[in-house]
Amino acid sequence: MDKFTTLTGVAAPLPIVNVDTDMIIPKDYLKTIKRTGLGKGLFSEMRYNEDGTDNPDFVLNKPAYRNAKIIVAGDNFGCGSSREHAPWALLDFGIRCVISTSFADIFYNNCFKNGILPIIVSPEDLDKLMDDAERGSNATLTVDLEAKEIRGPDGGVVHFDVDEFKRQCLLNGIDDIGLTMEKASSIDAYEKQLADNRPWA
């Protein structure tokens, strides 16, 4: 998993509440267990017209936001079914951070496990950040996980809180497998002892 320390990038405004995981990545894309290639399906029902062409009105299709790295979204982002494909699709598109006033629990935890930083802010701070994001190509935010702050294009700063264990995992690029491998020597010792004590097993 890639480390997340400081991210500077264009922030796309998505002022929609209750964006569920089916909106993030529709069920048609869930046939694969690969983490790559899902970016094309991100928000597909909003991104594409029925004939498959880009919907020019959708934010990520607008020239200023095609390379967005951050999404500033409405309340209760990631609700609905607990599909891990949702953070996979965001990451494959290039989104490393989602900012909202609240997230569904499973989606929130899945983000951390896949290298995405979900940030919870107050409604007042979200309004400020949404205003920043609506500036098009000037909508550049800097998310500093070390300092736990978001810096806007005009020098404004929004502070945020995050669970320290999750923060350290992101800063060091450690996912669940990485956490397990940190105990590799203890696991090896246990397996050797088990083999010595139960050679017939």
Image (cartoon, rainbow, N blue to C red):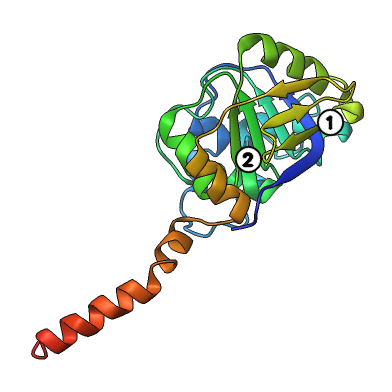
Residue 49 visible from this viewpoint: no
Q: Nearer the viewer, residue 84 or 114?
A: 114
Give the mark, 2 or 1, whose residue is nearer the N terminus: 2
> Residue 149 at what x, y percent from top left?
71, 29
**Which residue is at a point 50% across and 33% down the rendered structure image?**
22
Which residue is found at the position 52% from the left and 38% from the top?
26
Residue 101 % position (x, y): 57, 18
Identity, as a three-letter code, of the amino acid under mark 1: Lys
Tell me the residue at 40%/38% (across/down). Answer: 82
In the image, residue 55 sits, relative to residue 191, either above or below, namely above
Q: Residue at x 62, y 17 (%)?
A: 16
Q: Quadrant of the N terminus?
A: bottom right
Q: Which mark is residue 62?
A: 1
Q: CA distance from mark 2 to mark 1?
A: 15 Å
Residue 139 visible in the picture: yes
Q: In the rendered view of the protein, which quadrant contains the C terminus?
A: bottom left
- Give x and y (percent) for residue 31: 46, 53
How many marks are shown on the rendered structure? Answer: 2
Q: In this rendered view, identify the residue nearer to me: 31 or 166.
A: 166
Q: Report the side of 195 relative to 90 (left or right).
A: left
Label of residue 42 in the image:
2
Expressed as whole percent of the image width and height from the top left, the position of residue 66 reads 81, 39
SS type, badge 1: loop
Looking at the rendered structure, the kind of residue marked 2 is: Leu
Question: How many other residues sit within 10 Å of disc 1, few (<14), some (14-19) or many (≥20)?
Answer: some
Left-right relation of 187 to 131? left
Secondary structure beneath label 2? loop
